[in-house]
Amino acid sequence: MRNALLAVDLQADFVEGGSLPVPNGMPICAMIARHIRHFKTEYQFVVASRDYHEDPADHFSNTPDFLTTWPPHCVIGTPGAAFVPPIANLVREKLIHTIVSKGRHNAAYSAFDNGGYRISPHAVLKVVDADGTILEALDPNANRVQVITPDLGYVMTDLLRGPVKLYLGALGSRPVAGKSGTTEAYTGSIFIGYTPDLAVAASLMHIDAGPDCKSGYASLATNFPPSGWQCPTGVLFGENVGTSVWKPFVEAYYSSHPWPAMWAQPAGVVTRMVCPYDGGYISTGGYNEIFLKGVGEPTYPCGANPPPGAPPYTRPSPSPLASP
């Protein structure tokens, strides 16, 4: 896959008039919609995620701290859960190919790694007696809910391997996927990732117990009053959390546990060789990309769809034959 785009949570509750608005949220959504429409031939796969809450346990609060609890938002069946109109139009026109709903219950991020099944957390895996006899045990296949196809889960995992390959060193050659994030005004940063048998979330933030933010970056809190619990750092990005906290933890874990096998590519995902110039198909000299079978696979030869402003494609000259 040459180009893919993930549009994250462009919903009514996150723009002006919603329960959890982001400043200038609607203009930003409109800008993203224009970008998707203008470059619709450049993206082979466009995904829109959405918060889709039903009973998210301690995620909601009437007295939220805006760190681990939030006002009710994006509740299924309410106007706030809907995509904003410019994004909803793209869904109707099929310029957005897939919607990924998250946060319906307490578990939200398990489906990519589990064949499209959402896996809920369980506090008790088994109960044994004094002799070690198992009295009760969790059935991991019970109450599983298929939320996306195994093919889409594999493609999303492949996309999320990109950040790991980019800045987590040797983990890039392992079955590791993840994504960084930086919160509003740099009040904290996160890195969340997984392997076939482990899911880990790491967070760093600056906290001064009490009413005052003493990090030296309180002026960055332009949309909320800074406090000890909402204290901008100004110097911390999600990548920093990945390299300084998340990566060492995962490496330490697997220093005493065997690495699992790489994710197996399902039959509905195909590999095609594409050229760097425009993502067209080519038989040699390109690089391999994966595609959902029948979705986004290149239908034109290399050089037939030049990027805007690019010079005309020049086919590489064949290598001279060696003299006998």
Image: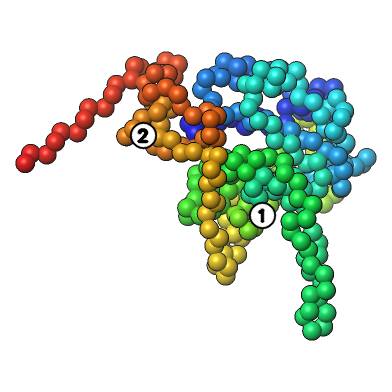
* Picture coordinates of residue 194, whole percent (x, y): 62, 52
CA separation, marks 2 and 1?
Answer: 34 Å
User: Which of 154/139 is in front?
Assistant: 139
Residue at position x 78%, y 55% in the image: 142
- Please name the residue shown 49% across and 33% down the image: 1
Residue 185, horizontal then vertical, whole percent:
71, 36
Relative to 196, does residue 167 appear above or below in the rendering? Answer: above
Q: Which residue is mark 2?
A: 286
**Is residue 180 visible from the viewing direction of this image?**
no
Looking at the image, is mark 2 or mark 1 earlier in the sequence?
1
- State the SS at label 1: strand
- Outermost residue to the bottom: 131
Quarter holding the C terminus? top left
Q: Which mark is residue 199?
A: 1
Residue type, numbered disc 1? Ala
Looking at this rendering, what residue extends furthest in the right direction?
Answer: 62
